[in-house]
Image (spheres, helix red, strand yellow):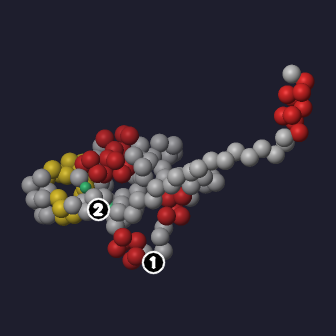
Amino acid sequence: MDRQQREYRSDGARVFRMVVRIDIYVADWNFMNRSGSMDVAEAFDNGGNEPTFVPASEASIEMLEKVNVEFSTTCSVCMEEIRIDSEATRMPCLHIFDEDCIVEWLHKSRFCPVCRFSMPADGDQ
Ligand SMILES: [Zn+2]
Ligand SMILES: [Zn+2]
């Protein structure tokens, strides 16, 4: 017991090694290029030290509008065509995505993949 405690104290500087994996989702590379610099920093800026993407709140995801697609467009998450007359999900910024794609996206990032419209997040005042 005594010996164990001493060993612990003498080992004052302990190294905790962590492997952190950060996935950065670039859905619309043209947009990224147009904006000049990758504004990933903005997504990281949560006022703290840890780079995290803030997910949209569950309530805001549930309230997304379902629309009937009237003109063919491209889902900027999976880059697949969304066909006319199919059902898609529209964000408040009026960008349209496959439902599965945008729901998955918003669980990772509150920002619209096209225009970075910011969805409400838990913890917003
Ligand atoms: Zn999609
Ligand atoms: Zn948008």
Ligand 1 contact, mark 2 (Cβ < 8 Å)? yes
Q: Are marks 2 and 1 in contact (CB under 8 Å)?
A: no
Q: Is residue 24 left or right of residue 102?
A: right
Residue 30: where, in percent of width, then height? Answer: 34, 73
Q: Amino acid at mark 1?
A: Gly
Q: Depth check: 9 or 56 in front?
A: 9
Residue 118: where, in percent of width, then height? Answer: 41, 56
Report the Cα–Cα distance between label 2 and label 1: 19 Å
Q: Which mark is residue 99?
A: none
Evaluate whether residue 43 shows in this view: yes
The answer to whether residue 102 is above or below residue 2 is: below
Residue 26: where, in percent of width, then height? Answer: 39, 63
The structure residue drawn at horizontal position 67% and vertical position 47%, both measured from the top left corner, is: 17
Q: Which mark is residue 36?
A: 1
The answer to whether residue 69 is above or below residue 7 is: below
The structure residue drawn at horizontal position 50% and vertical position 59%, both measured from the top left corner, is: 43
Evaluate whether residue 46 shows in this view: no
Q: Depth check: 81 or 67 in front?
A: 81
The structure residue drawn at horizontal position 56% and vertical position 58%, both measured from the top left corner, is: 45
Q: Depth check: 111 or 21 in front?
A: 21
Q: Amino acid at mark 2?
A: Ser
> What residue did someone put label 2 on?
76
The answer to whether residue 66 is above or below residue 43 is: above
Helix or strand or loop: what does disc 2 sit on? loop
Q: Depth check: 77 or 123 in front?
A: 77
Residue 3: where, in percent of width, then height? Answer: 89, 27
Helix or strand or loop: what does disc 1 sit on? loop
Ligand 2 contact, mark 1 (Cβ < 8 Å)? no
